[in-house]
Amino acid sequence: MNYTRIAIAALVAFVVDSLYGFLVWGMALSGEFGRYPQIYRAAADQTSYLPLMFAGTLIGLFFAACIYAKGYEGGSGMAEGLRFGVLMGLFMAAYGAGVNYGIMRIGKKMALTYAAGWFGEWLLVGLAIGLVYKPATAAIKRAAGV
């Protein structure tokens, strides 16, 4: 694994994820979160927590890029990234939405919103990582069995 390539892929994925988060979670779904004030911070209170959220996101996406690099099978970046994004999206949709529904006071609609939102988010994040991360030539040949 090339950690410089992984870091660059993680940084690009962070930008994509942050834009998605702002547009989908922050804008389109803010009203839905507002229905659950006992769980979610009010929008005015969130600003002071954003640095930690962004730091955690960047660190998490670095590890996601590492997982991508370990699972790379030698295909095109787009195909590999979409495969990775679908798998991570399905994982997050099933695990995250299921856990949140089980422990938070949210309805089925909110749980399904999480599932759909995380699936879309990881589809784009996986695609970004796949398009940016380029494995070393030797790794490509090993993956292809050459």
Image (cartoon, rainbow, N blue to C red):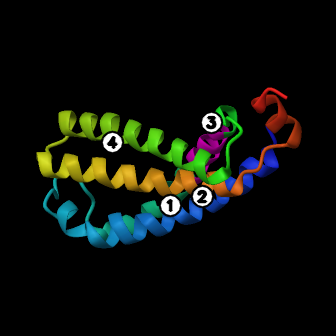
According to the picture, the residue beneath numbered tag 3 turns out to be 67
According to the picture, the residue beneath numbered tag 1 turns out to be 17
Q: Position of residue 127 (x, y in %)?
A: 56, 55
According to the picture, the residue beneath numbered tag 2 turns out to be 128
Classify 10 Å Cα crowding around label 2: few (below 14), some (14-19), many (20 and above): many
Q: Residue at x 48, y 69 (%)?
A: 19
- Local SS, label 2: helix
User: Separation of disc 1 and disc 3 at Cα?
Assistant: 17 Å
Classify 10 Å Cα crowding around label 3: few (below 14), some (14-19), many (20 and above): few
Q: In terms of secondary structure, what is the magenta stretch mainly?
A: helix
According to the picture, the residue beneath numbered tag 4 turns out to be 93
For the residue pair 74 and 47, the one nearer the viewer reads as 74
Magenta segment includes 60: yes
Magenta segment, which residues?
Answer: 58-68
Q: Residue at x 41, y 44 (%)?
A: 89
Task: Tell me which label, 3 or 2, sits earlier in the chain.
Answer: 3
Proximity of marks 1 and 2: CB atoms separated by less than 8 Å: yes
- Given this view, does label 1 or label 2 mark the residue nearer the observer? 2
Task: Tell me which label, 1 or 2, sits earlier in the chain.
Answer: 1
